[in-house]
Amino acid sequence: GAGVSQSPSNKVTEKGKDVELRCDPISGHTALYWYRQRLGQGLEFLIYFQGNSAPDKSGLPSDRFSAERTGESVSTLTIQRTQQEDSAVYLCASSSFGNTIYFGEGSWLTVV
Amino acid sequence: QQQVKQSPQSLIVQKGGISIINCAYENTAFDYFPWYQQFPGKGPALLIAIRPDVSEKKEGRFTISFNKSAKQFSLHIMDSQPGDSATYFCAASISDYKLSFGAGTTVTVRA
């Protein structure tokens, strides 16, 4: 595709359930990022993948959050036992290393 | 700890006016300073970026001013148009890696 694709675009889940969010980066982009954006706030770094290197997980807020990436393609962000404070937009971005970072439109997560 | 501080939180400007958004940073290792524009329901999109070897960069109606000694940079939107109404984020990183974002400025341009 032409841009970063994320799914689902919207997700409403019950507190305590697990959710999976998917990101398809731009083809050929070796770097992939996940950010979280709470309502009316800035972007909070979660995790970074670069090629086959070990991911930078320094932004993950708790052990309920995890992410995987298959090679240089799809990534999945998993949130276990969701809490209401997890409600946010989860943005995926990708880049060729050292170049412009392109964002997807985000997955809007609401925990009720 | 927020590495990039952005102000104001919001601003309203008349059509044709100038919008100015300011950002300050602490980490002197930062060497890449982009600005992103975000419309409601959309992801952020790169607007313009600067590296610290220049003090100003202009693209159309958008200009970044950079003050390395003060560790500050700003975005100026000249001749603001209603279509410029959006949220603007400044960011900073080391070599384009792991951007640290400001909290955002919501700009409203009144016709």
Image: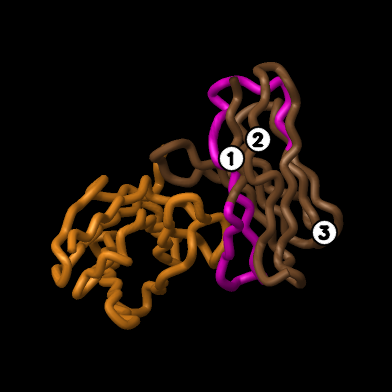
Chain colours: A brown, B orange
Judging from the image, what secondary structure is the residue with disc 1 in?
strand
Give me the residue at 76% from left, 70% from top.
A27
In terms of sequence position, does the residue under pointer 2 or pointer 3 come before the other? 2
Q: For the residue carrying disc 2, how many other residues have a C-alpha within 10 Å: few (<14), some (14-19), or many (20+)?
A: some
Task: Out of B30 and B105, give the one closest to the viewer.
Answer: B105
- Please check the rendered image and state whether residue A110 is part of the magenta-colored stretch, yes or no: no
- Please check the rendered image and state whether residue A83 is part of the magenta-colored stretch, yes or no: yes
Judging from the image, what secondary structure is the residue with disc 2 in?
strand
Residue lying at the far front of the rendered structure: B111
Magenta segment = A78-105
Q: Nearer the viewer, mark 2 or mark 3?
A: 2
Residue named by callout 3: A52
Q: For the residue carrying disc 3, how many other residues have a C-alpha within 10 Å: few (<14), some (14-19), or many (20+)?
A: few
Residue lying at the far top of the rendered structure: A16
Give me the residue at 66% from left, 61% from top.
A4
Residue named by callout 2: A11
